[in-house]
Amino acid sequence: MSNETVVTLQGWVGGDVVLRQAGEVSVTSFRVACTPRRLSRRTGEWGDAPTQWYTVNAWRALAEHCADSLRRGDPVLVTGRVNMRPYVTKAGAEAIDVEVDAYCVGHDLTRGTTCFTRMSRAEPSPDTSAETSAETTGEQREPAA
């Protein structure tokens, strides 16, 4: 990760979350809208700056979790590596698409609450399956006597 630009975005999911396969790997893409608020020193009033749009790509397990968890309009926090992709619009103008390859994605809890479900990484062994089941479902277990 040396010499890479890493950012954290705070914004809103601005469209549908699309899950697809890239070879054998899952990838999710979605757009995040960030609208900074500014205080005018002259008037003392808050106002919105222009909305900035970012394309977020998540890979592998993170991609599947994003597809299962995020919906249009959800407040999110995204941390990842920035890539800038120049392109030409239909009108012939040059533009830049800012993409973020996400390292982590989560709901912005300053805007509401969420319910977390832990995903297991491997099948539990028979002697720990009851403990693992209780952890993932949030059940309270009595201590062993």
Image (cartoon, helix red, strand yellow):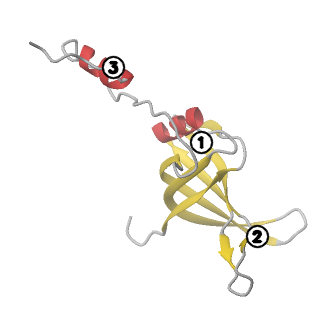
Crowd band around label 2 with a 10 angstrom C-alpha radius: few (<14), some (14–19), many (20+) = few
Find the distance from the CA under tag 3 to the CA under tag 2: 52 Å
Q: In the structure shown, which secondary structural element does the residue marked by tag 1 occupy? A: strand
Between residues 113 and 18, which one lies in front from this camera angle? Answer: 113
Q: Compared with residue 71, is residue 79 higher up or lower down, i.e. above or below?
A: below
Of badges 1 and 3, the one in the foreground is 3
Q: Amino acid at mark 1?
A: Thr
Position of residue 20 measured from the top left corner of the image (x, y, whole percent): 62, 36
Q: Which residue is mark 3?
A: 139
- Mark number displayed over residue 28: 1
Farthest residue to the front: give it: 44
Of label 3 and label 2, which has the lower sequence position? 2
| Type of amino acid at the residue the image marks with label 3 | Glu
In the rendered image, residue 69, in percent from the top left (x then y), is placed at 56, 35
Q: Residue 89 placed where, x, y %?
A: 83, 64
Q: Few, some or many C-alpha atoms within 10 Å of disc 1 (few <14, some 14-19, many ≥20)?
A: many
Instruction: Using residue 136 as the reference point, say whether residue 61 is left or right of it.
Output: right
Residues marked 3 and 2 touching at CB (< 8 Å): no
Q: Residue at x 53, y 53 (%)?
A: 77
Task: State the image quarter where residue 2 is shown.
Answer: bottom left
Residue on which the image places disc 2: 95
Between the C-alphas of marks 1 and 3, the distance is 32 Å
User: Could you tell me how far apart the alpha carbons at marks 2 and 1 are, in whole angstroms?
Assistant: 23 Å
In this picture, residue 32 sits left or right of residue 27: right
Question: Which residue appears at 59% of the width and 36% of the height?
Answer: 67
Which sits earlier in the primary sequence, circle 1 or circle 3?
A: 1
